Image (cartoon, helix red, strand yellow):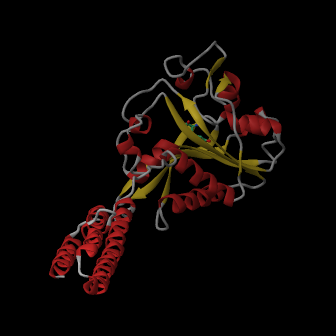
Amino acid sequence: MNEIQILVDEALKEIDSAKDSNTLNNIRVKYLGKKGLITSLMKKLKDLPQEERPKFGAMVNEAKDTVTQKINEKLKELSEKEKKQKYEKLAVDISLPGARRDIGHLHILTQIQRELEDIFISMGFEVVEGPEVEDTWHNFDALNTPDWHPARDVQDSFYFTDKILLRTHTSPVQIRTMLQRKPPLAIISPGRVFRRDYDSTHLPMFTQMEVLFVDKNVTIKHLKYTLEEMAKRIFGEGSKVRLRPSFFPFTEPSYEVDVLFGDTWLEILGAGMVDPNVFKNVGYDPNEWSGFAFGLGLERIAMVKFGIKDIRDFIRNDIKFLENY
Ligand code: DAH
């Protein structure tokens, strides 16, 4: 009987120190299995005197119950712990930074273009497009640009033939639109233009936007108001514009337009009142109709607005540059 108690004590100690359910199973087999230490005690029953047998049997059964119960308790505890460990291993740590997915954004020139389109659409202008491959009549002659003008020189433009070239500005869209429609009209035309230039402020391909407004009794005041409105919305509420006399063959009078940036005036575009000869070329009566026009370079606007120093940055595809805008 002493032996039973010793076995039970030993079993309980082993159960206590078991670290996992596998060990616990081995303990169960060791003590309670068919040939287990406690199970085997029953075999000693027949060697005992008759009167001691019931007591001994009861003690062995009690020992079995004690050990079984202890094993079950421990098993419950361990399997809960193991389950927890397993889930902890599987769990996603939401405090870790996730794998970042870089999504791109519109190129700065596309952003500027859309910004300008929004501004002019809100003032009632309509967006129209023209071809990048032009003929010299639309690109020059109809715009009152004489033969001697340097822009017509092969040194300055890309010609396919004597009469077909890559347009050097978006102004021919003025001509195409006026030939197709009757006045009044208010249009803008963004697009690519091409010149034989390449340095930190010139690209062989760049982007312009043409603005044309034709109606009765249009004056410089309308032009100036439109420029100021545009400047306010691109460069900020307090921005100022200045018109400087200049020359373009297709406007009379003509202006260079500057915006005030800090304490310096920066040139942003060319403008003017549509030349009567241009109206004649498209069949509008210059005594009846008047208008203003201007043309701006989108790269130029972006360079002024953001202080970009080299126009070539727009086409370098340098992500470090592009990410800034
Ligand atoms: N087409 C001119 C250029 O590319 C810009 C320009 C100046 C457009 C005056 C205009 C204008 O419509 O009125 O340099």
Quadrant assignment, res 218: bottom right
The single residue placed furthest to the top in the displayed view is: 161
Residue 94 lies, in percent from the top left, at 38, 65
The single residue placed furthest to the front in the displayed view is: 50
Residue 254 showing in the rendered view: no
Left or right of residue 94: residue 63: left
Q: Nearer the viewer, residue 145 or 98?
A: 98
Residue 98 lies, in percent from the top left, at 39, 57
Q: Nearer the viewer, residue 53 or 239?
A: 53
Quadrant assignment, res 69: bottom left
Left or right of residue 93: residue 203: right
Q: Nearer the viewer, residue 141 or 8?
A: 8
**Vertical order, 115 against 51 (above or below):** above
Image mark count: 0
Ligand 1 falls in which quarter? top right
Indicate the quadrant containing the N terminus: top left, top right, bottom left or bottom right: bottom left
Q: Nearer the viewer, residue 91 or 228?
A: 91
Left or right of residue 248: residue 204: left
The single residue placed furthest to the right in the displayed view is: 182
Residue 47 lies, in percent from the top left, at 23, 73
Residue 284 lies, in percent from the top left, at 81, 40
Residue at 71% x, 53% y is 125
Residue at 33% x, 76% y is 68
Residue 148 showing in the rendered view: yes
**Vertical order, 207 against 153 (above or below):** below
Left or right of residue 171: residue 259: left
